[in-house]
Amino acid sequence: MPQARRIEEWEWDDGNLSELGRHGLTRRVVLQVAEGVPAFRRNRGGRAAVFQMIGPDRGGGFWTVCLVESTAAAPGRWRAVTGWASDAEEIAWYRKTGRG
């Protein structure tokens, strides 16, 4: 899981920024969640993103960001493929991890 790996850099392009924007997310929000104290879990099977990163932004809003490692050739480089404002279950799960 990403907890055992570090997010060393992000991969952004118009496609993923546009998809994030459709769900109210911006690059800034994703970075705020990542730079805070996020919790990570596996995403549901059959999805493009392998992991979910859940945590608050600097304003206290909670976000669920779906991540995929860009390539095996570039470990530590991650791509946020979609995301949304966290629902009550996701926030409860985050708090249960002891991070919030």
Image: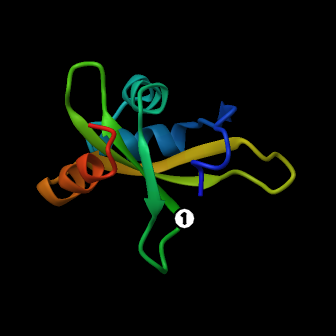
Please give left or right for residue 38 compared with residue 75 in the image.
left
Q: Quadrant of residue 99 in the image? A: top left
Q: Residue furthest top?
A: 58
Quadrant including the N terminus = bottom right
Quadrant including the C terminus = top left
- Of 81 and 57, nearer the camera is 57
**Residue drawn at x 32%, y 44% as measured from the top left:** 98
Under mark 1, the amino acid is: Val
Q: Please tell me whether residue 68 is drawn above or below residue 50 in the rendered image.
A: above
- Residue 34, given in percent of the width and then of the height, sits at 47, 32
- Residue 53, given in percent of the width and then of the height, sits at 43, 48
- Residue 97, given in percent of the width and then of the height, sits at 34, 51
**Residue drawn at x 67%, y 46% as measured from the top left:** 5
- Of 40 and 99, nearer the camera is 99
Q: Please tell me whether residue 46 is drawn above or below residue 94 in the rendered image.
A: below
Please give left or right for residue 83 compared with residue 17 in the image.
left
Q: Residues within 10 Å of mark 1 (few under 14, many from 20)?
A: some
Q: Residue furthest right?
A: 73
- Of 75 and 36, nearer the camera is 36
Q: Which residue is mark 1?
A: 50
- Of 45 and 91, nearer the camera is 91
Q: Quadrant of residue 63 in the image? A: top left
- Residue 75, given in percent of the width and then of the height, sits at 78, 47
